């Protein structure tokens, strides 16, 4: 979906929500931001000094109904007192959902088998020198950076291996 088409959809949804008497913020950025890095969330509403910004994951741009649902969900967060999924947000979500035939929830119901938005691969393996246990890690962490400062459950020392590498990476302690 093109940016202009996305902005037009948000404008239409804003108008529909306001027509229902839902107090969407007047200080809303007219452009929807597309986040190409977001993998775990469908959308986000954040507040700046000049107003509210709605952001959606690039992964849902070709799924019109999911995009529509996400935009409405995030637009509801611009209402006064609705920055979280509390009582006010739920009341507006119920009202908008009934009128617009949407099932607006805190999380999206998944039909069929759930496919994660992100397919993370294991990048690091911590290996216990005593028992041989292999602890997989997808992201850099303190234990991955400095394995000599941590111990396995058995009490053994840990060393780091990068996936595909059988020799541990040398680190200078200091």
Image (spheres, rainbow, N blue to C red):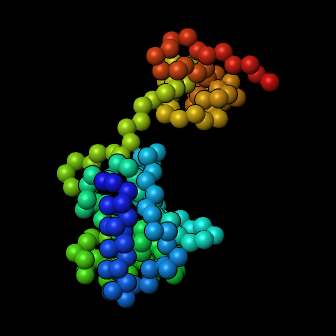
Q: Residue furthest left?
A: 112
Foreground pick, 75 / 89: 75
Foreground pick, 101 / 13: 13
Q: Residue furthest right?
A: 174
Location of residue 33 with respect to 119 vertically, above or below: below
The quadrant in which residue 118 appears is top left
Can residue 108 be seen in this snapshot?
no
Foreground pick, 84 / 155: 84
- The residue positioned 42% from the left and 36% from the top of the image is 120
The quadrant in which residue 160 appears is top right
* Percent position of residue 32, x then y: 43, 61
Please indicate whether residue 51 sits to the left or right of residue 88 in the image. right
- The residue positioned 37% from the left and 38% from the top of the image is 119
Please indicate whether residue 63 sits to the left or right of residue 130 in the image. left
Location of residue 7 with respect to 115 vertically, above or below: below
* Percent position of residue 96, x then y: 31, 79
- The residue positioned 32% from the left and 70% from the top of the image is 104
Can residue 170 be seen in this snapshot?
yes
Count of numbered circles in the view: 0
* Percent position of residue 138, x then y: 49, 34
Q: Residue furthest front?
A: 4
Of the 4 image quadrants, the one containing the C terminus is: top right
* Percent position of residue 87, x then y: 44, 80
Q: Residue furthest bottom?
A: 21
Please indicate whether residue 64 sits to the left or right of residue 132 in the image. left
Location of residue 79 with respect to 5 vertically, above or below: below
- The residue positioned 45% from the left and 51% from the top of the image is 35
């Amino acid at each position: 979906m093109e940016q202009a088409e996305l902005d037009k959809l948000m404008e239409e949804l804003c108008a529909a929500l306001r027509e229902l008497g839902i107090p969407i913020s007047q200080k809303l950025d007219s452009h929807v931001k597309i986040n190409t890095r977001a993998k775990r969330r469908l959308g986000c509403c954040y507040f700046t000094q000049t107003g509210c910004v709605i952001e959606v994951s690039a992964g849902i741009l070709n799924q019109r109904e999911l995009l529509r649902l996400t935009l409405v969900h995030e637009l509801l967060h611009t209402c006064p007192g609705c920055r979280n999924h509390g009582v006010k947000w739920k009341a507006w979500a119920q009202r908008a959902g009934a009128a617009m035939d949407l099932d607006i929830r805190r999380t999206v119901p998944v039909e069929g088998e759930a496919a994660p938005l992100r397919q993370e691969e294991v990048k690091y393996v911590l290996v216990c020198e005593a028992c041989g246990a292999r602890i997989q890690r997808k992201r850099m962490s303190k234990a991955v950076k400095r394995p000599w400062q941590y111990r396995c459950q058995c009490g053994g020392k840990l060393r780091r291996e990068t996936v595909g590498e059988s020799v541990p990476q040398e680190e200078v302690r200091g």
